[in-house]
């Protein structure tokens, strides 16, 4: 992946735009694309070695294990905060956590491991879905 920044939609010799990648006719060929801030590389077409459902199960099970471990470590602080300083709703507090994580990512905090950031964001969004479902009941 390249580290240079490009304007959204600007093509370079090694990257396609998101639209180009989605409509590319190559089957099973690696495609590099640029969405403006992040470079992505993936393979198009169907492959006998790739099973979306299996890969999804792996990712979701890993996230589930991570969230359960953090819940054991920190208690149910995301869904049942102690409210010492903030009286904001649980959902609003989750929005703040997500905004903080996105802000650090956007500002290019050099101490952040991008993989950890994605897992944290995915986790916060899953917890937000739980909170919203809980609020509906």
Image (cartoon, helix red, strand yellow):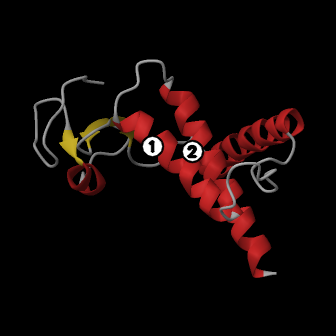
Earlier along the polypeptide chain: callout 1 or callout 2? 1
**Element carrying mark 1:** helix
Q: How many marks?
A: 2
Q: Disc 1, disc 2: CB below 8 Å?
A: yes
Q: Residue at x 63, y 55 (%)?
A: 94
Query: Does residue 78 appear anywhere in the picture?
Result: yes
What is the CA distance from the residue labelled 1 to the residue labelled 2? Answer: 8 Å
> On the image, numbered disc 1 is attached to which residue?
102
Residue placed most toward the observer, 5 or 81 = 81
Residue 126 image position (x, y, % from top left): 67, 55
Task: Give the side of residue 37 with respect to residue 87, left or right.
Answer: left
Task: Give the side of residue 108 with respect to residue 47, left or right.
Answer: left
Q: Residue at x 77, y 42 (%)?
A: 67
> On the image, numbered disc 2 is attached to which residue?
121
Task: Give the side of residue 118 with respect to residue 105, left or right.
Answer: right
Residue placed most toward the observer, 132 or 55 = 132
């Amino acid at each position: 992946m390249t580290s240079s920044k490009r304007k959204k939609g600007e093509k370079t010799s090694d990257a396609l735009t998101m639209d180009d990648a989605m409509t590319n006719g190559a089957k099973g060929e690696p495609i590099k694309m640029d969405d403006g801030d992040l470079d992505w590389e993936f393979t198009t077409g169907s492959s006998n070695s790739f099973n979306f459902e299996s890969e999804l199960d792996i990712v979701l099970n890993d996230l589930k294990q991570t969230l359960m471990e953090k819940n054991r470590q920190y208690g149910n602080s995301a869904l049942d905060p102690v409210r010492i300083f903030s009286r904001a709703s649980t959902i609003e507090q989750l929005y703040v956590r997500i905004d903080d994580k996105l802000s650090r990512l956007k500002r290019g905090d050099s101490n952040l491991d991008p993989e950890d950031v994605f897992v944290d964001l995915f986790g916060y969004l899953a917890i937000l879905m739980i909170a919203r479902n809980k609020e509906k009941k």
